[in-house]
């Protein structure tokens, strides 16, 4: 007989992806979100990051992203902002 455990997840603004991601992160775990396009992956990462505090462990990495190329692109800036919160795409 399989043991079934139900976990209650706080719903965030009718967004199941955001709800389960934030719940997983709040439990000290990692979440991997799959999307259909690169643009939607970036948007999901930004949505999650907007709900989190800065992560001191990833600040240095977020700054390095901006120096990978001679001129940082909009995508580099978006990734850098997400990385400050411990989120990537």
Image: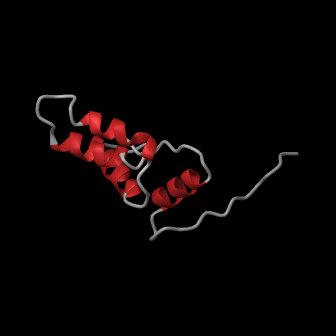
Residue 88 location (% of width, % of height):
38, 41
Quadrant of the drawing holding the N terminus = top right
Q: Which of 34 and 52 is in front in this view?
A: 52
Quadrant of the drawing holding the C terminus = top left
* Left-right relation of 52 to 61: right
Q: Nearer the viewer, residue 60 or 80?
A: 60
* Left-right relation of 53 to 8: left
Colour scheme: secondary structure
Q: Mark yes or no: residue 25 visible.
A: yes
Q: Which of 85 and 37 is in front in this view?
A: 85
- 73 lies above or below 51: above
Q: Mark yes or no: residue 89 visible.
A: no
Q: Residue at position x 35%, y 37% from top?
A: 60
Name the residue at the top extreme. 69
Name the residue at the left extreme. 71
Name the quadrant containing residue 70: top left
- 7 lies above or below 42: below
* Left-right relation of 45 to 68: right
Name the quadrant containing residue 72: top left
Residue 5 location (% of width, % of height):
76, 54
């Amino acid at each position: 007989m399989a043991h079934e455990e139900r976990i209650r997840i706080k719903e965030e603004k009718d967004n199941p992806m955001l709800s389960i991601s934030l719940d997983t992160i709040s439990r000290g775990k990692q979440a991997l979100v799959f999307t259909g396009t690169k643009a939607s992956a970036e948007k999901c990462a930004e949505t999650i990051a907007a709900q989190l505090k800065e992560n001191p462990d990833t600040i240095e990495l977020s700054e390095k992203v901006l120096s990978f190329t001679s001129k940082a692109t909009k995508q580099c800036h978006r990734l850098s902002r997400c990385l400050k919160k411990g989120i990537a795409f």
